[in-house]
């Protein structure tokens, strides 16, 4: 069954459903009634899943927090992503398009806005008060008749800084970026009793809070960098729900680390999708920059056992995607090959498959080769 991350942006005063936590000068942060939803849901549940989460949560600058993407949801490097507006005011559409295109300068991706053709990213404004986006290639799992992104409070009169904050954030999600509180290596100093009490007022159970806030994603499915309190993916937070005294305001710009990090995920000087021929020559490659992810494609012409391996001096992690869907993950491996190399053995049906390779140490670089062999 396909699953989709659908992550939304908090509203601010004057837009969307808003609450104010309190009036202390360090805590004048708006709190949305809309979830920044991090729950993985079946598509059948997606349309009706509407939970509430504090809008504008950014996180204290303790060591270990990271800017982060899901490596399993990154688009192919060099890809042209088609974007179509499902509805909306032409003036609002024009502003959204102009801001979204800023991401083209920071990645090796092209955003092609189309009027009627099929599109990977489909933008609506119909769900008033709420803004959200599918994460990366999860957009492929959304039926073509449905939006993959929504802006629920953008109007022609909305301030430009609010356009910039929300559009930059949601397109970050659309390119694969996740929220800071999902990081597997961090330890946010939440004041858990206060967090539980806050969400109880909004109808959440303790299990809801644990799943949507305190639980983290699998470390092997993410790339991350050092903590960046100025990231566009970081929300403002009052210190009333954390231990200690700490507050961060609203971020509206792409930070320098946002730009650096996403250039590594979609490097302009790296080849795009490369072909691996089963039982052919191995492909020699180089992880030339920390955090780089290389992607490959191969075709299984007939059903049979396929052996996928990396070789070389680097500690690589190998992920298999498919069949016929680069967003679907079949398997991944770290050290089952020789030394610190990866090895996956799977019986595959005929179809199209993809591989992604990254270094286990997200700060390291190195050389390797990748190959596919088959046996009946």
Image (spheres, rainbow, N blue to C red):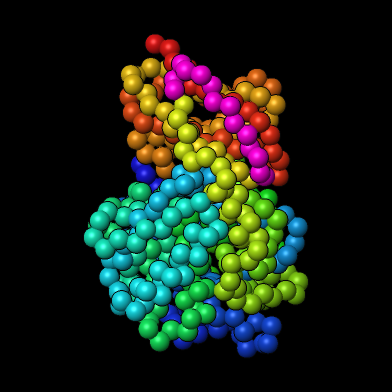
Image quadrant assignment for residue 294: top right
Q: Residue at x 43, y 70 (%)?
A: 98
Q: Where 282 falls versus 19 (above or below)?
A: above
| Residue 37 shows in this picture | no
Q: Residue furthest front?
A: 269
Comparing 200 with 214, the one in front is 214
Q: Nearer the viewer, residue 184 or 373?
A: 373
Extreme-top residue of the structure:
376
In front of the other: 7 or 322: 322
Q: In this view, does 164 lie above or below 75?
A: below
Q: Residue 248 versus residue 88: which sits nearer the camera?
A: 88
Identify the main secondary structure in magenta.
Answer: loop
Q: Can residue 344 be seen in this view?
A: yes
Identity of the residue drawn at 58% across and 54% down: 262
Quadrant in which the N terminus is drawn: top left
- Which x, y percent locates residue 69? 56, 52
Q: Residue at left 66%, top 60%?
A: 257
Image coords of residue 273 (percent x, y): 46, 38
In the picture provided, is 242 more to the left or to the right than 198? right
User: Can you say which quadrant of the picture contains the C terminus?
Assistant: top left
Counting the numbered discs, the total is 0
Residue 99, image x, y percentages: 47, 70
Vertical order, 62 against 154 (above or below): above
Q: Is residue 226 left or right of residue 254?
A: right
Q: Does the magenta stretch include residue 116?
A: no
In this rendering, would 277 be left or right of 187?
A: left
Residue at (40%, 87%) from the top-left corner?
A: 157
Residue 74 image offset from top left, x and y in percent = 49, 47
In the image, is residue 281 part of the stretch drawn in magenta? yes
Q: What stretch is highlighted in magenta?
A: 277-290
């Amino acid at each position: 069954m396909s699953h989709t991350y659908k992550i939304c942006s908090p509203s601010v005063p004057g837009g969307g459903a808003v609450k104010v936590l309190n009036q202390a000068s360090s805590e004048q942060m708006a709190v949305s009634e809309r979830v920044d939803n991090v729950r993985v849901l079946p598509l059948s549940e997606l349309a009706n899943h509407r939970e509430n989460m504090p809008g504008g949560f950014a996180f204290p600058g303790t060591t270990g927090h990271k800017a982060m993407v899901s490596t399993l949801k990154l688009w192919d490097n060099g890809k042209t992503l088609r974007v179509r507006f499902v509805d909306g005011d032409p003036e609002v559409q024009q502003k959204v398009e102009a801001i979204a295109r800023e991401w083209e300068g920071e990645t090796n991706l092209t955003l092609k806005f189309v009027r009627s053709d099929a599109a990977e990213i489909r933008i609506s404004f119909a769900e008033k008060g709420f803004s959200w986006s599918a994460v990366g290639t999860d957009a492929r799992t959304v039926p073509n008749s449905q939006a993959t992104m929504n802006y629920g409070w953008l109007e022609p009169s909305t301030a430009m800084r609010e356009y910039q904050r929300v559009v930059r954030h949601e397109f970050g999600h659309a390119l694969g970026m996740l929220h800071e509180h999902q990081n597997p290596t961090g330890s946010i100093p939440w004041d858990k009793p206060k967090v539980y009490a806050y969400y109880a007022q909004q109808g959440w159970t303790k299990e809801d809070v644990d799943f949507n806030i305190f639980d983290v994603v699998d470390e092997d499915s993410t790339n991350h960098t050092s903590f960046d309190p100025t990231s566009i993916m970081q929300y403002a937070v009052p210190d009333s729900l954390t231990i200690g005294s700490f507050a961060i305001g609203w971020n509206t710009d792409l930070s320098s680390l946002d730009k650096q990090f996403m250039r590594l995920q979609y490097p302009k000087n790296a080849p795009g999708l490369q072909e691996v021929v089963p039982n052919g020559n191995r492909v020699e490659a180089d992880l030339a920059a920390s955090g780089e992810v290389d992607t490959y494609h191969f075709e299984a012409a007939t059903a049979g056992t396929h052996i996928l391996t990396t070789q070389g001096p680097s500690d690589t992690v190998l992920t298999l995607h498919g069949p016929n869907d680069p967003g679907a993950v079949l398997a991944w491996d770290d050290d089952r090959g020789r030394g610190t190399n990866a090895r996956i053995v799977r019986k595959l049906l005929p179809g199209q498959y993809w591989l992604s390779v990254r270094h286990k140490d997200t700060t390291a670089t190195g050389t390797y080769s990748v190959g596919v062999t088959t046996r009946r």
